[in-house]
Image: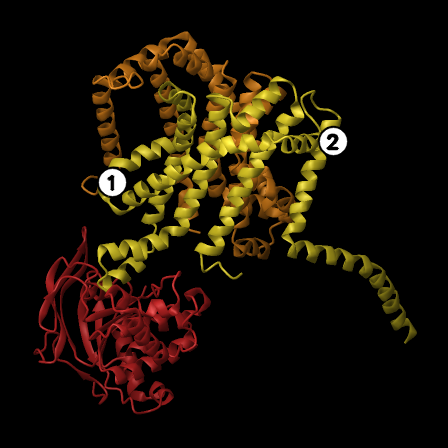
Amino acid sequence: MANPALARSGSVTSAASNDAVVQVREICKNYGDVEALRGINLEFERGKLTTLLGPSGCGKTTLLKIIAGLVPATSGEICVNGHAVTGPGPERAFVFQDFALMPWATVLRNVGFGLELKRVPAAERDRTARRYIEQVGLAGFEQKYPHELSGGMRQRVGIARAFAVNADVLLLDEPFSAVDEQNRRKFQEDLLRLVELEKKTFIFVTHSIEEAVYVSDRIVLLSPRPGRVSQVIDPMIDRSASPDDIRRDAGYLDVVEEIWQGLRQYAE
Amino acid sequence: MTLFGTRVPMMASLLFWLLVWEIVGRLDVMFLIPPFTSIVSAGFELVQTGSWQSASMITLRSFLYGMTLAITVGVPLGVLMGRFKVIDNIFGLWVNMFVSAPLSALVPILMILFGMGETTVVVTVFLFAVWIIVLDARAGVMQVPTSLIEMGRSYGASRWTIFTKIILLSALPEILAGIRIGLIRGVKGVVIGQILVSIIGYGELFELYSRSFDMERFWALTMLLFAAAMLLSAGVEHFEKRIEYYAGAR
Amino acid sequence: MQMSISPAKIDNGIGASQEAPSTTAEMIRTFADERRSFWIVVSLAVLFITWEIAGRVPISFAFPTFLETVSAFGEMVADGSMHRAYFLTLQPLVLGIVVSAIVGIGLGVAMGLSDKAEWLLAPVFIVLQAAPMAALVPLVTFVYGIGLTAKTLAVIMLALPVIVLNSYKAVRHVNPSLVDMCRSFQGSRMQQIFKIIIPDASPVLFAGLRLGIAAGFIGVMLAELLITPTGIGDLITYHRSVANYAHMYAAVASIIAVSTLTLAGLQYVETHLLRPEKRRK
């Protein structure tokens, strides 16, 4: 409690900051008789990475898809940049857990697909796609097909595609869950670099406590059946340190332990 | 449609099409399409006739003999192909070829080899049904998880025990799926065989009704056949669902 | 020392004498494993030799040997009757398949995309696929006589339900995550259908087409044997009536071979062009 690295927001519905890009108001979601989400209120600040963390069945992916406009909410409202939204929009881009790459298209076409749908001319589309392919470290793989890439490389394609449409908000649904442990760590470091570089708002879903603490500015803990916000934690990790030092840092480890204590009651 | 459950819509749209049929039939557009109600009443008369009953017995008998033969040959061959690479290599080509070959072209050969009678129909049923049974049994045996076999070996099971208690039981869902498709193909086989032979069973009746332009009876017989094929397929599907629980757990 | 060496020497001797044949066997085995064509030749040989022996016994007066059949085939190719027969047989087949492909893929895709179309059509085609459609082939002759139209209709009757149901399943089994992806980038419904759903469904659509062609071959043979003897059906019927069994067998074997080669070719196209994940292997 007295840990200096922990700064908890007092209540879930804390005073609205003026810099909220995405506002989630009283979102409820029912699947038939099953109540998946109940009364979710959240705000996501510009330029920050917020993680939705919780045990399986807590509705974190559902909430992310509601924010994305892919799944309709039963009640409640999502506001992006102050406007209520009901479907997908150009200011949000989604990164899928299973990559969602078109197997018949090259890396270049996959990355440029968001622009292709917006009917951006081919030359401009390719130029943008190439820039982001390079930024995620896949230069030289433009003409490869997804099946020729490893899981980690495929997700880099998925991330490049989301960046290429230049959305304000990036929604990442367990993006690294299909990536092996070594690549996962590399990925987390790259993600932090991209957050720094792109100044975008990131909403990130994961079930890994360590991953959440390592990458997040703010962690929203969800409890299951029905999904509710149980706790909001700001880890306040000093990111100027080297990745290995962060992972050994006492503050980091305390936050991990804190979250685990909150979640262990839901473990099977 | 999502408005109702899942079973209701299927019936509903078929009823809609039967209604369309009835209207077309009443309008007398084509002599080929009599009103559905008169087909149904012709069907009730038909099932009481001795000629239909004896034709049904012959058809059923050929079908059962052919299917029994197909299953007793098909399942062991498929299992052997799944277990032994050499057998698989020798028969694989032919099984894969005959499973989609135009077997209707073979029936004239069967007619000269086995005569214009039931034997030809039995062999036709066998040839239509057997290949898919072989292929599915083979696939079932080949996809038995290695970890299950290794589990059996680590607990000291003999090769025979592993074979009967692990491999065969594990392949059962695929074997049954193959038999179900085999049954549907067998029905097509019995019809094609009888129509081409044309002097026994339903083939004879079809020939008779179409020559005398007795469309009510022709359709009534067709509908009975279709209904029997659907019932058979639904029946096996129901049986398959009962063992599905462990196929899903794999 | 010697005591301990000599068993090893004996061992070596036995080992060496066993090794020579085992390496040959090994060589054959690796050769067989690597060469699929080797097994194709073996399995062809097994059947043809069995056929030849059965014909020489003979198991039936109406069972020619393999070699007789081959020479009958050569004879029919030489006198041109084979070409004429295939020219006649392939017309209704190609026509029927083209019609079934256009109508079938159209209906199937519509059923996959729209719940209303599914409700209206799916049960009908499920019944038609499970039912023995062959029973209806004689009916066609009443309306369309014994010409090309009747035979084409017979092909369509057998091929269409297969193509429709497979196209329908292909669309229903499109990766939902790809559809979500397209929606998340604000793709329109048309873009969703033409850029995601149809490309993702195309391998299964093509596989359905292949099954439809297999059914079409059954249909065309049925039509030629039942409705009117033309093409290959005529070769079969005619040579049977004059007891030219070798010629009859050659005609039957040739249509089975043609259908098999067509289907194998389509499967090759399917795996090598339509599935990039299976390409380059």
| Chain whose colour in the figure is orange | B
Q: Position of residue B248 (x, y in %)?
A: 40, 49
Residue B171, image x and y in percent? 51, 44
Residue B130 tag number: none
Q: Residue furthest front?
A: C79
Chain corresponding to yellow in the figure: C
Residue with the mark numbered 2: C53
**As drawn, A51 above or below A31:** below
Q: What residue is drawn where x is 59% and y is 31%?
A: C82
**Quadrant containing the N terminus of chain C in the rendered view:** bottom right
Residue C117 circle label: 1
Q: For the view shown, which residue lies furthest in the top direction?
A: B50
Which residue is rendered at x = 34% and y = 35% of the image?
C126
What colour scheme was applied to this rendering of the protein? by chain
If you read the primary sequence from the N terminus, does the residue marked by circle 1 or circle 2 appear first? 2
Residue A14 appearing in the image: yes
Q: Write down the chain letter for disc 1.
A: C
**Residue C232 vs residue C206, the one in the foreground:** C232
**Whole-percent x, y for residue A68 in the image:** 20, 65
User: Which chain comes out red in the rendered image?
Assistant: A
**Residue located farthest toward the right when viewing the structure as drawn:** C2
Q: Quadrant of residue C180?
A: bottom left
Separation of residues labelled 1 and 2 (CA atoms): 56 Å
Where residue A22 sits, quadrant-wise, is bottom left
Left or right of residue B208, residue B73 in this image: right
Q: Is residue C167 above or below residue A90?
A: above
Q: Is residue A174 above or below residue B81?
A: below
Give the residue type that dot 2 points to.
Ile
Would you say C243 lies left or right of B206 here?
Answer: right
